[in-house]
């Protein structure tokens, strides 16, 4: 797929050139994963998907103040190809396409000059996140809003399956619906082919990766497990994260593999989370 032109109006975005002044041999960029956003901590969010927008801005502002460079998809792909890059860089990804992305997150991204990739289930535009028992009936961005977002400087849509189905164990026909046909629907909506994919629930197997690669996506994102360019793990940022836990996640070497391994020892994982995140909810 052709590279998307560098959007205007984002002076802080790192455009990577080989041998550029001030650039260092590539360090793997940090890929952040968000979902929804809110003004005050939500009581109906057991999965801790909705990050308070003030914390979202605090996290991005801290990265920028520490000299981290935000990447768009072109910059990220260049870094993966081994071109020289800034010593510390990050890519923002946002899954699911909740309406709070447009209402709350995009103003922060634009104010700070940070690009983002927005992954949406192509069949559910304008509907609800039916895969979530809570929060019930959470609205998703409609086609007009998605077209608007894809046209904004620094915002790019990506495929998140058709209807947020776990792709593990899917047969050829279902994978065709979730990957190829979902891509076609989102490309029609965006007015151009889209270039990247994120697995619903971060879940993938060999067949899913083959289907995504065959569709021509430049990169696909999972959550904790890496399996080449079509299953790149990300750092999850959730509602319980303090600035301290966020800093730990982005700076700790091999955090993603370490945290994924703790899935096998949930008691230890709970203790680690309790030490690094805030548990009480804000008073209303």
Image (cartoon, rainbow, N blue to C red):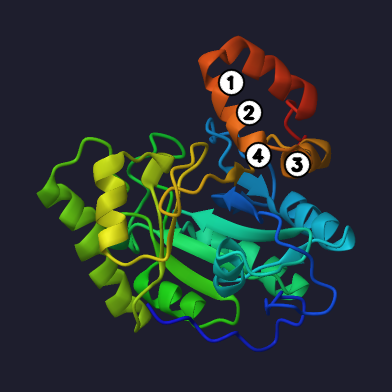
In the rendered structure, find residue 93 and report the number of the disc placed on it. Answer: none
Q: CA distance from mark 3 to mark 2?
A: 15 Å
Q: CA distance from mark 2 to mark 4?
A: 20 Å
Say which label, 3 or 4, has the lower sequence index.
4
Judged from the image, the secondary structure of the residue bearing numbered disc 1 is: helix
Q: Residue at x 44, y 35 (%)?
A: 134
Say which label, 2 or 4, has the lower sequence index.
4
**In the picture, which quadrant includes the C terminus?**
top right
* Front one among 117 and 85: 85
Judged from the image, the secondary structure of the residue bearing numbered disc 3 is: helix
Q: Is residue 169 left or right of residue 216?
A: left
Q: Are marks 2 and 1 in contact (CB under 8 Å)?
A: yes
Nearer the camera: disc 2 or disc 4: 2
Residue highlighted by disc 2: 258
Q: Residue at x 65, y 13 (%)?
A: 268
Q: Is residue 90 left or right of residue 171?
A: right
Say which label, 3 or 2, has the lower sequence index.
3
Q: How many discs mark residues in the rendered view?
A: 4
Residue highlighted by disc 4: 239
Q: Residue at x 31, y 75 (%)?
A: 187
Residue highlighted by disc 1: 262
**Residue 246 in the image, given as x and y percentages of width and height:** 75, 41
Q: CA distance from mark 4 to mark 1?
A: 19 Å
Quick one: label 2, few (<14), some, or many (20+) residues within 10 Å?
Answer: few
**In the picture, which quadrant includes the N terminus?**
bottom left
Residue at the far right in the pictured view: 65
Question: Relative to 41, does residue 123 appear above or below in the rendering?
Answer: below
In the figure, residue 157 lies in which quadrant? Answer: bottom left
Q: CA distance from mark 2 to mark 1?
A: 7 Å
Quick one: label 1, few (<14), some, or many (20+) residues within 10 Å?
Answer: some
Question: Relative to 46, does residue 163 appear above or below in the rendering?
Answer: below
């Amino acid at each position: 797929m052709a590279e998307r032109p560098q959007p205007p109006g984002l002076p802080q975005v790192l455009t990577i050139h080989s041998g550029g002044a001030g650039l260092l041999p590539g360090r793997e960029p940090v890929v952040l994963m968000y979902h929804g956003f809110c003004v005050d901590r939500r009581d109906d969010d057991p999965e801790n998907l909705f990050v308070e927008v003030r914390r979202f801005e605090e996290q991005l502002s801290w990265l920028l103040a520490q000299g981290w460079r935000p990447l768009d998809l072109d910059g990220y792909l260049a870094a993966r190809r081994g071109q020289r890059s800034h010593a510390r860089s990050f890519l923002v990804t946002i899954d699911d396409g909740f309406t709070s992305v447009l209402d709350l997150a995009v103003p922060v991204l634009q104010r700070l000059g940070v690009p983002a990739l927005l992954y949406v289930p192509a069949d559910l535009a304008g509907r609800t996140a039916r895969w979530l028992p809570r929060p019930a009936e959470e609205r998703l961005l409609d086609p007009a809003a998605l077209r608007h977002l894809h046209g904004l400087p620094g915002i790019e849509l990506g495929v998140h399956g058709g209807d947020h189905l776990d792709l593990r164990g899917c047969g050829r026909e279902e994978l065709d619906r979730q990957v190829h046909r979902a891509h076609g629907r989102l490309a029609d909506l965006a007015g151009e082919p889209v270039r990247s994919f994120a697995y619903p629930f971060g879940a993938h197997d060999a067949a899913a990766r083959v289907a995504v690669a065959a569709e021509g996506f430049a990169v696909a994102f999972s959550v904790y497990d890496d399996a080449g360019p079509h299953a790149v793990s990300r750092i999850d940022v959730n509602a319980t994260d303090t600035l301290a836990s966020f800093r730990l996640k982005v700076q700790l070497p091999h955090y993603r593999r370490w945290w994924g391994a703790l899935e096998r020892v949930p008691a230890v994982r709970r203790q680690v989370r309790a030490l690094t995140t805030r548990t009480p909810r804000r008073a209303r």
